[in-house]
Image (cartoon, rainbow, N blue to C red):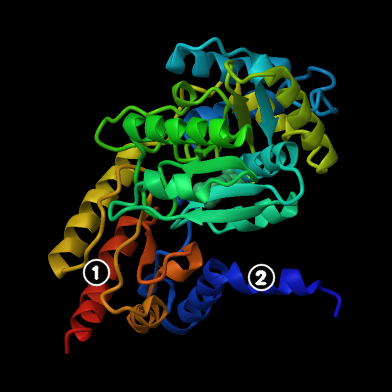
Amino acid sequence: MAVARKIHEFMEQGSWIRKMFEEGIALKQQFGEDNVFDLSLGNPIMEPPPQFFEELRRIANSSETGMHRYMPNAGYPDARAAVAAGLAQETGMSFTGDHVVLTCGAGGALNVIMKTLLDPGDEVVIFAPYFVEYMFYADNQGGTCRVAPTDENWLPDLDALATAITPKTSIVLVNSPNNPTGVVYSAEILAGIGEVIRAKEAEFGTEISLVSDEPYRKLLFDGAEYPQIFPHHPRSIVATSHSKDLALPGERIGMIAVSPDYPDGEDVVDGLTFCNRTLGFVNAPALMQHIIGRLQDVTIDVGEYESSRDFLYSALTDIGYSVVRPDGAFYMFPRSPIEDDVAFVDQLKQHRVLVVPGAGFGMPGHFRISFCVSEATLQGSLEGFRQAFNATSD
Ligand SMILES: Cc1ncc(COP(=O)(O)O)c(C=O)c1O
């Protein structure tokens, strides 16, 4: 067997979204593209904003030499400084380019962070439901994940967090706005997480980093401001990207920001830069670095996602679904009307509606809807949601 047993097992565990994707293709071939309502993927259907294309043209027409060569592994100093300037303005903290490492997306950023911080066997505490890749990223870098539960609103349970932290915990990983629930962690919750971490650091004599995975940071609804993690723990690190806020997931441009208050932060940035190199990323794509430094104030039209949230939330709750109203991102995580989420997702599929079972996010009994789809797809899905729900009470 060429593929390692562990990878075979991981492929099975992490296959839900791909499975729905493949089933979607088969259904579309059978019923036609317009008659299948695919709400399974987190791939934004929006195009990047016009400013992105202006910058792309500017770069394409530039005759500056060396623009496509290797650069320092952390990225071009001007691009890092531009990211830092935005963070300094937003947080009031003294960020400079030296606190920023540019990466291949948030996924690349998380791998680099884990590689830098984890000793073999170290633990990463994550909250369920979770983005399933965390398990694989931790394994890539020699660690394991320990899962802490959340409450009925998908917010961290601080007592459970305290129980989940052990002497082997190196990272507590949060994700807000959250995939798959769309909930946003308030400043109070982040402050509570910081307090628990420091109490545990004191109890065990260890150092624990609070890592925030925030590719949906700018996708916030109702005019809300983003609660930053930096004020809540000195050892805090952000991993993010422009995959969602500039609709550039295929371009693989992301970044890491280390708190200016991080003890020995310079050493950490050196470690991150080294791991960006030795993991084989080498550096974030040069072309994107030239562009995103000038787009730090630009975001896709979040209003479109907010309208979709409003439309879908009200339609689903009218039908009778129980769902926590998302405050950001483009996901919803309703309760399955029957206990077996996989069976219910199958029923939805009979009505040509594709979603992902909660089992794929470590939280059976629910399912994830991704509403970054066209209005027609959203509207078209409602009849299927209604019929599948009603069939459960027959
Ligand atoms: C919670 C979460 N983290 C990280 C990522 C990875 O994003 P990127 O495309 O920036 O690697 C995603 C992508 O969907 C995500 O949902």
Q: Amino acid at mark 2?
A: Met
Which quadrant would residue 62 be assigned to in this image?
top right
Badge number at residue 11: 2
Q: Is residue 295 above or below residue 323?
A: above
- First in sequence: mark 2 vs mark 1: 2
Badge number at residue 382: 1
In the rendered image, residue 12, in percent from the top left (x then y), is placed at: 63, 74
User: Which quarter shows the C terminus?
Assistant: bottom left
Residue name at image x 50 percent, y 26 percent: 233
Among all residues in the image, which is located at the extreme left?
A: 318
Residue name at image x 28 percent, y 43 percent: 306
Among all residues in the image, which is located at the extreme front?
A: 203
Secondary element at tag 1:
helix
- Report crowding for label 1: few under 14, some 14 to 19, many 20 or more residues within 10 A (C-alpha): some
3D distance between C-alphas at marks 2 and 1: 32 Å
Answer yes or no: is residue 156 visible.
Answer: no
